[in-house]
Amino acid sequence: MLGIDINAKCFAVSIVTPWGKILKQTYLGKDIWVKRKKIFERREKLRSLADKGSHRANRSLKKLRKTERDFVRNRLGEIVKEITDMALRYDAEVSIENLKRFKSLGKRANKKIMRIPFYKFKQLLESRCFDKKITLNTADSWHTSKWCTHCGAVGDRRSSNYSLFKCPECGQIVNNDRKASLAIAVKPLLERKALQGTTLEFFQFSSRRVPVNGLLRSDDRVVSQVVHDSSTPMESPLR
């Protein structure tokens, strides 16, 4: 199962076997945020000039909007191709969170953060997975960011660094996005077992049995969906 965590700056990917072996963990699309940050800074300067009556700045703003839109669309297409090629290479299904949109932080803050356009990415991924006959699962987002992949505890991160998750129980510190992508990969496997009538209290990662009670809702046995069907150490080294 290939799990994808989509955050403000990149895509975190984890590939795990049904028996718990982590095959690959990596990041994709970091350049999108870097490029858009430069565009944002350029836009702010042009907007300041446009507000002072510069027609040339207004024309440049329109051109810059198209440049950003085309860049994001093209890069999303390339990333989706990379993800689906990876899924085929590892003979894996794909799993993403069942999100509608990111929580709004305010108009200006949203512009500054320059989040990945999730809906556009999801549309592209659904289309490419359908074309390549790859099963695409949407996993319930319940506790994916709070579940510790080391001890199974559930809690808020205890780290001042947003990118890191420090477990409140065992103290394990891991990259938050990599951890979330692993949880997103594991969830459909657990829920599939539940659908088959097998209740799992632990998930086996190499030699470690990690409790999964906190990862699934207690009042709902199977909450993930299949969008379409084609009918070691805790974290692997970053490749």
Image (cartoon, helix red, strand yellow):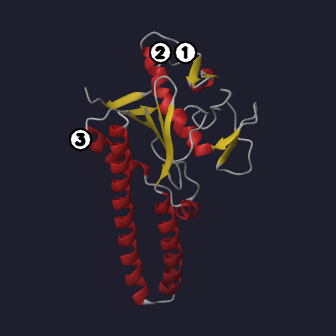
Q: Amino acid at mark 3?
A: Asp
* Side (left or right) of 46 relative to 119: right
Give the Cα distance between marks 1 and 2: 7 Å
> How busy is the neighbourhood of tag 3: few (under 14 within 10 Å), some, or many (20 plus)?
few
Q: Position of residue 79 (x, y in %)?
A: 38, 52
Q: CA distance from mark 3 to mark 1?
A: 33 Å
Earlier-in-chain disc, 1 versus 2:
2
- Residue 83 position in % (x across, y down): 38, 45
Can residue 149 be seen at all in this image of the molecule? yes
Nearer to us of marks 1 and 2 is: 1
Q: Position of residue 198 (x, y in %)?
A: 48, 11
The numbered disc on residue 235 is none
**Of the numbered discs in the image, which one, if any, rests on residue 194?**
2
Quick one: label 2 or label 3, which is nearer the N terminus? 3
Q: Disc 1 designates what residue?
A: 200
Relative height, residue 108 to residue 198 (above, below): below
Q: Residue under circle 3?
A: 131
Mark 2 residue element: helix
Q: Name the amino acid type tagged 1.
A: Leu
Q: Residue at x 34, y 43 (%)?
A: 84
Q: Residue at x 48, y 68 (%)?
A: 35
